[in-house]
């Protein structure tokens, strides 16, 4: 057990657990439904049926701090032309532009009217959020495992969810009201663009979808619930990082810093919330490092990261973990599907290169040692990786250089129960998903016991877990165009939960 101790909630219900794993489960699951002072909810843990271990220790008042520094500063209301001074080439809004003309037109020309108008909009947003919080809270009291709401596509149900009903309600509320403004500043290739193939595909795919603007996007910043900072760490690294510089990440961090500088000077929104209602997204290992060049970005903004390493400052209360996936062709075709449990002849499988201390231990202990736990550094000629995934009961997903591993998604696609071997990793969507129900989590110190642990899972239990892996698959599939409840929408939903968790006041 790691000597970690984190506080989950604000002072009124401060509850802390000494076990890191439990912290992970709880922070993530309860954030949206149980932050009483923050959400103005008189909500208690007794509404939930899950149990936990570990005992309360000390208290850090993170969320309260997050809420209390938010305010709307009257002095920072933008002028009507605040959006027209873009000097970043083709992406600019000009006055009289179609978009500006139709979307940004305000009734009344006086400064006072404009200000009042903007206040009304902010109030409307906060009112919509308050309503959503209330209905999610009410819904989460119902401990039914199956959602009670109508949905023509899919009913969240069963133990893969922390609270299927609350999730469904929250998802439907999001679809109804959530709006995202994407800053137009910045030029491709480092902005508004990202890789849609290979290991960082999920970064590019999200960015491209937001640029297309088919879902959730608004072009009126006063109407937005959150603001997206569309820079790609992968692309910035590709263009400004000097490979001969011995890991000098400064040039990458400075691009990000400049960008926030521009955004905070040109628009009132960053200063208004000190960054709390802004988000960035990156799948690059250096995503966290790149954000560390701006304090408010690192500490306040919603950082959507693959590299969700709590030891690198990932904060499950305000940040979002999203899945890494290796799409070699950019396509998902051929990756989804696997054999039935009885056709799975291998107990556990892993193939991958040696990098990072966890893999070192895994390979050191298991490589070429066991017929049941098949661990390869390099797959022998003629053996298909996909086939191995499909015919294994469990797929080992150890962290490498960084905590996230594309193997988790590979396993889920191949309907193989993932075995997460990591330290301080917050798995994707764990606000909503109950990872314990469809995955196995093994501590690094238990690597030598892997076989014993996995053999200890009964056929019946295995078969239940495997069925759940199939059920959870839809949340990890990237579709083009996106489909409800798929990876894109789940990322947005995680961001929505973070925004639900803060108030921005006009005083
Ligand atoms: C779900 O909740 C509703 C309303 O609380 C109740 O009428 C219904 O019987 C419950 N269903 C199950 C399966 O518990
Ligand atoms: C936001 O705050 C910074 C630093 O305090 C200031 O320089 C900048 O002008 C402000 N932006 C706006 C739009 O007022
Ligand atoms: C997580 O971050 C810590 C601190 O930077 C680092 O030492 C550790 O190696 C990281 N974990 C992984 C699996 O990379």
Image: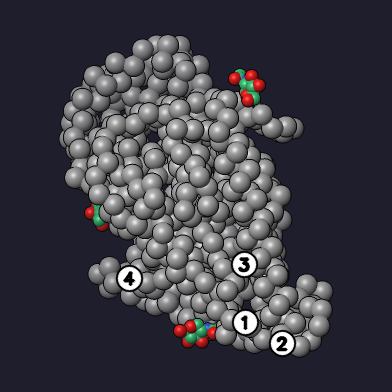
Q: Which mark is residue 182?
A: 3
Q: Residue at x 32, y 49 (%)?
A: 7
Looking at the image, residue 325 sits to the left or right of residue 138; the answer is left
Q: Nearer the viewer, residue 92 or 137?
A: 137
Give the distance between the C-alpha atoms of the residues marked 4 and 3, in whole angstroms.
26 Å
Looking at the image, residue 205 sits to the left or right of residue 299; the answer is right
**Is label 3 in a helix, a strand or a loop?**
strand
Q: Earlier in the sequence, mark 1 or mark 4?
A: 1
Q: Earlier in the sequence, mark 2 or mark 1?
A: 1
Q: Which mark is residue 245?
A: none
Local crowd size for mark 3, using a 10 Å CA cut-off: few (<14), some (14–19), many (≥20): many
Give the distance between the C-alpha atoms of the residues marked 3 and 2, in whole angstroms.
25 Å
Q: Residue at x 36, y 12 (%)?
A: 458
Local crowd size for mark 1, using a 10 Å CA cut-off: few (<14), some (14–19), many (≥20): some
Q: Which mark is residue 249?
A: 4
- Image coords of residue 411 (percent x, y): 44, 32
Residue placed under numbered mark 2 in the picture: 111
Looking at the image, residue 271 sits to the left or right of residue 9; the answer is right
Residue placed under numbered mark 1 in the picture: 77
Q: How is the image coloured?
A: one colour
Q: Earlier in the sequence, mark 4 or mark 3?
A: 3
Give the distance between the C-alpha atoms of the residues marked 2 and 4, in whole angstroms.
44 Å
Q: Earlier in the sequence, mark 1 or mark 3?
A: 1
Name which quarter of the figure residue 225 lies in. bottom right
The quarter of the image holding the C terminus is bottom right
Q: Determine whether label 2 and label 4 are within 8 Å by CB.
A: no
Q: Residue at x 25, y 25 (%)?
A: 450
Q: Earlier in the sequence, mark 3 or mark 2?
A: 2
Give the distance between the C-alpha atoms of the residues marked 1 and 4, in whole angstroms.
35 Å
Q: Determine whether label 2 and label 1 are within 8 Å by CB.
A: yes
């Amino acid at each position: 057990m790691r000597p970690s101790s984190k506080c989950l909630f604000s002072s009124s219900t401060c509850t802390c657990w000494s076990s890191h794993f439990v912290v992970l489960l709880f922070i993530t699951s309860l954030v949206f439904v149980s932050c009483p002072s923050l959400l103005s909810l008189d909500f208690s843990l007794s509404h939930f049926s899950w149990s936990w271990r570990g005992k309360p220790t000390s208290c850090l008042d993170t969320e309260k701090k997050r809420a209390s520094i938010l305010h709307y500063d009257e002095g920072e209301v933008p002028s009507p032309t605040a959006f027209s001074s873009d000097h970043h080439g083709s992406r600019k809004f000009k006055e009289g532009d179609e978009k500006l003309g139709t979307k940004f037109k305000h009734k009344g020309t006086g400064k006072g009217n404009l200000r009042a108008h903007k206040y009304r909009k902010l109030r409307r947003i906060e009112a919509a959020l308050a309503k959503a919080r209330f209905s999610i809270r009410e819904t989460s009291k119902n401990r039914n495992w199956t959602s009670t709401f109508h949905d023509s596509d899919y009913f969240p149900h069963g133990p893969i969810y922390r609270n299927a009903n609350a999730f469904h309600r929250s998802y439907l509320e999001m679809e109804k009201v959530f709006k995202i403004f994407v800053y137009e500043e910045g030029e491709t290739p480092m902005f508004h663009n990202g890789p849609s193939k290979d290991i960082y595909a999920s970064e590019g795919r999200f960015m491209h979808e937001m640029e297309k603007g088919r879902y959730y996007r608004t072009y009126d910043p006063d109407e937005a619930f959150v603001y997206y900072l569309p820079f790609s760490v992968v692309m910035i690294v590709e263009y400004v990082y000097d490979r001969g510089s011995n890991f000098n990440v400064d040039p990458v961090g400075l691009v990000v810093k400049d960008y926030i500088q521009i955004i905070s000077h040109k628009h009132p929104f960053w200063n208004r919330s000190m960054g709390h209602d802004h988000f960035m997204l990156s799948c690059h290992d250096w995503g966290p490092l790149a954000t560390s060049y701006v304090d408010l970005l690192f500490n306040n903004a919603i950082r959507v990261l693959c590299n969700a390493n709590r030891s690198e400052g990932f904060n499950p209360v305000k940040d979002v973990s999203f899945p890494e996936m290796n799409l070699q062709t950019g396509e998902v075709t051929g990756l989804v599907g696997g054999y039935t449990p009885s056709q799975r002849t291998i107990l556990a499988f892993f193939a991958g290169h040696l990098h990072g201390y966890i893999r070192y231990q895994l390979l050191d202990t298991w490589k070429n040692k066991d017929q049941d736990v098949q661990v390869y550094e390099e797959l022998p000629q003629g053996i298909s990786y996909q086939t191995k995934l499909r015919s294994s009961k469990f797929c080992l997903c150890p962290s490498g250089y960084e905590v996230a591993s594309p193997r988790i998604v590979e396993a889920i696609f191949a309907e193989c129960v993932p075995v997460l071997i990591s330290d301080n990793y917050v798995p994707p969507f764990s606000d909503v998903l109950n990872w314990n129900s469809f995955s196995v989590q093994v501590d690094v110190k238990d690597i030598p016991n892997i076989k014993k642990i996995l053999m200890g899972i009964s056929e019946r239990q295995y078969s239940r877990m495997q069925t759940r892996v199939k059920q959870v698959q839809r949340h990890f599939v990237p579709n083009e165009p996106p489909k409800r409840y798929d990876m894109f929408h789940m990322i947005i939903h995680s961001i929505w939960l973070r925004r639900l968790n803060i108030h921005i006041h006009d005083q």
